Image: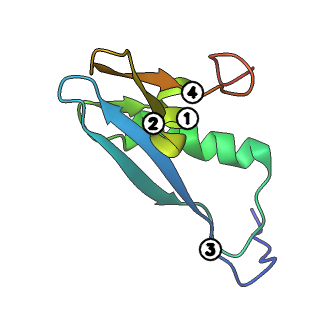
Amino acid sequence: MTIKLQAPLTVEIAVSIINDATGQQGVATYSLAKGRFHDEASLREGLASFESKHMPEGFRLMTKREWFNSEFGQIPEDDGDGNIQYINVAMPGGDNWSE
């Protein structure tokens, strides 16, 4: 197999992960092959490889809602009695990554 270098670049992917038992959230970073541009298929392949081979013990990938809330937060709402509830911000598409 011949490797063709395409540019002086390194692509690093930051993946949001969560531990259900502890509620701990984090970001795991991994690198794809250096010196080349990546298409959606190679990014998906890299993510699948990370998830199956390198995911920290006890962690999983965040769901779409978990990721959206971690990036954009929730809106605090007072019920009038001083009790604060957090309301989700409208999220594009549905609850699944494919939507």
Q: Which residue is mark 2?
A: 51
* Contact between labelled residues 3 and 4, with CB atoms less than 8 Å apart: no
**Circle number at residue 64:** 4
Question: Dot 4: few (<14), some (14–19), or many (≥20) neighbours within 10 Å?
Answer: some
Question: Mark 3 or mark 2, which is nearer the start of the sequence?
Answer: 3
- The front one of 85 and 88 is 85
Alpha carbons under labels 1 and 4: distance apart: 6 Å
- The front one of 92 and 64 is 92
**Circle number at residue 16:** none
Image quadrant in which the C terminus is located: top right
Q: Percent x, y for residue 6?
A: 81, 76
Asked if residue 47 lies left or right of residue 54, the reply is right
**Circle number at residue 68:** 1
Which residue does the image show at 36% across and 16% down from the upper left? 80
Question: Mark 1 or mark 3, which is nearer the start of the sequence?
Answer: 3
Q: Amino acid at mark 4?
A: Lys
Question: Mark 1 or mark 2, which is nearer the start of the sequence?
Answer: 2
Secondary structure state at the residue bearing disc 1: helix
Alpha carbons under labels 2 and 3: distance apart: 20 Å
* Contact between labelled residues 4 and 1, with CB atoms less than 8 Å apart: yes
Q: Which residue is mark 3?
A: 10
- The front one of 63 and 2 is 63
Image quadrant in which the N terminus is located: bottom right
Question: Mark 2 or mark 4, which is nearer the start of the sequence?
Answer: 2
